[in-house]
Amino acid sequence: MDLPAPLQWTEHVLFSLLLAVVVRSYVLYGLTGVLKDLVKFLRLLPGVDTLIQFILAREVQTFMNKVSATPVDSEPVKKAVEIPEKGCSAEELLQDMAELKALETVTEDGKVFAYVYTMEDEHAKTLRKAFDMFNDPTGYDGNDKPSARENVVNQFAHTFLHENALSPMVFPALRKMETEVISMVATMLNGDSRCSGSLTTGGTESILMAVKCYRDRARELMPHITEPEIVAPITIHPAFEKAAEYFNLTVCHAPLKPDFTVDLAAFEKLIGKNTVMLAASAPQYPYGIVDPIEDVGRLATKHNLPFHVDGCFGGFMLPWVEKLGYPVPPFDFRVQGVTSVSADVHKYGFGLKGSSVVVYKSSEIRRHQIFAYSSWPGGLFGSPGFSGTRPGANIAASWAALRSLGEDGYMQKAEQLMKTTLAMEEGVDSIQGLSIVGKPAMTAFAIMSTENSGIDILALADAMEARDWHMERQQLPNTLHCTIMPHHIGREMVFINDLTESADEVRGKASLSSKGTAGMYGMVAKIPDRAVVDEFILQFFDKAYKL
Ligand SMILES: *Cc1c(COP(=O)(O)O)cnc(C)c1O
């Protein structure tokens, strides 16, 4: 074939380049190097990558069917699972439990060589007793005796206590329950069936995973960024700072306006050429205020950036508060620009400690969360989250908690908790010199002292502690945080009376500011160098975790 002169010339250059590359990799890495380069080269040709992806998907399906104890569904998109409208009865759930347990690989017959180190012996009985003692489910429902629901959650934890979700194939029921919990959370947050996510050990891990995910996404899509940044309000949870420290990013914090909502103009100014993700909270922990998710969503769309909504606190509360008719600004997947949301099962999901969910808008995003390592002599290794071994008890308990409460159960709790919260807020506002910080959206608020009230809020905390309350002190500015939980229901008046008494006690007594813990917090607040305070925290923890 006669090519026109310029093409002949180009062909010549391309061929020489290819030859140079092949010779180089042969010299450096031998034949495998040449093969690697050949594959890289082939993948550049149109259609080849699609073909490889197609073959891979088929191989993964075959592989899963070979290694799984039960057939694996090959439907590309399965129907989403929702939290049932009415909570399931204990009997119904125990029947499910028996069926699910029957799916699992039996380890007691001694044919499994990994994952489970314990067995059903006397020792396990001791473990179960200890587990029950420290996972006392009473209190979640605000009663002294565990309800049928609480018993069911505990029975699920017991039944799957020894199981390990390290491999998704050995315990198919764990996999089913985990994917269903994720789906129930996704639908609760108005995500569609393309959503995918992970069940993690808590809000912190959910956030760490989202940050890692977007960092690695940026590495692929924005390789020029070497110093990745997150833009978020100053009230965002420290888990983001922790993630940034662990994974080498920087959090750029936007300040608040006098009404305690984030300064959106300042937020947008922080978005720059190094930004890899935006984050905001629904609601933020300190004041229970929902960040302007729609506005941040608009910025995310405008700047083509992913946006994580930290719903660790409110993910399992805001949906019901909204359905009850209270004003809740849009905060979930309905908002354009939101690419992921986290929600803690072990907070208002009323599951056992050690469970949270992070949901992404699609598997293409979640892909960057998963760790893969194919060169270990111990086998092909992969893991979705921080932990390797993952306890089955939590997965089972989470599944049972969501199904046994059901939407009606969650609504009922939300209704009671909102009534209690509003009564407490009203009580606080009625006390001279005290007020609620900003406009909280759900079952949490902060108390501050008004200007010239003569009340030092930290001295007020000390006065409350003298009355046996455990107060949560906040700083910059000093406030007191209250999260309202089922054990507060019916205790509104005790709280308001004690708060009124305490306020009367400290009002006008400036000397109290230098006494007790108020004095200590006051002193710490005055230290100009925060590094010194950080060192204080390090030494505190060093001492706290010594025998
Ligand atoms: C609790 C909380 C977290 C962290 O969750 P953990 O379960 O404590 O790790 C993150 N964000 C918000 C808003 C929270 O309230």
Image: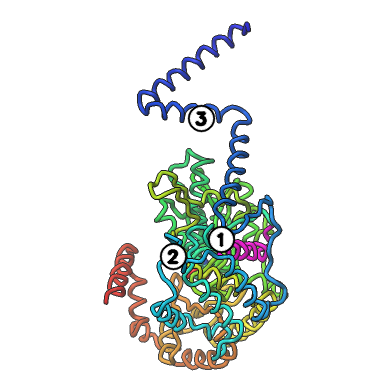
Q: Which residue is mark 3?
A: 39
Mark sitting earlier along the chain (3/2)? 3
Q: Which residue is drawn at the image coordinates 70% and 72% (left, top)?
A: 84
Q: Quadrant of the C terminus?
A: bottom left
Residue 262 shows in this picture: no
Find residue 340 and report its horizontal and vertical position in percent. Answer: 59, 57
Label 2 crowd bin: few (<14), some (14–19), many (20+), radius 10 Å: few
Find residue 234 and report its horizontal and vertical position in percent. Answer: 49, 62
Q: Are marks 3 and 2 in contact (CB under 8 Å)?
A: no
The secondary structure that dominates the magenta segment is helix
User: For residue 145, which quarter of the picture?
Assistant: bottom right
Mark sitting earlier along the chain (2/1)? 2
Label 1 amino acid? Val
Label 3 crowd bin: few (<14), some (14–19), many (20+), radius 10 Å: few
Residue 503 painted magenta: no
Task: Identify the magenta region.
Answer: 172-192
Label 1 crowd bin: few (<14), some (14–19), many (20+), radius 10 Å: many
**Which residue occupies the foreground of this view, 182 or 425?**
182
Q: Which residue is drawn at the image coordinates 55% and 30% (left, top)?
A: 43
Q: Which residue is drawn at the image coordinates 51% and 61% (left, top)?
A: 206
Q: Which residue is mark 2?
A: 110
User: For residue 395, which quarter of the picture?
Assistant: bottom right
Label 3 amino acid? Val
Secondary structure at badge 2 equals: loop
Q: Which residue is mark 1?
A: 358
**Which residue occupies the foreground of this view, 212 or 51?**
51
- Distance between the alpha carbons at the discs numbered 2 and 1: 35 Å
- Closest to the camera, between mark 2 and mark 1, is 2
Label 2 amino acid? Gly
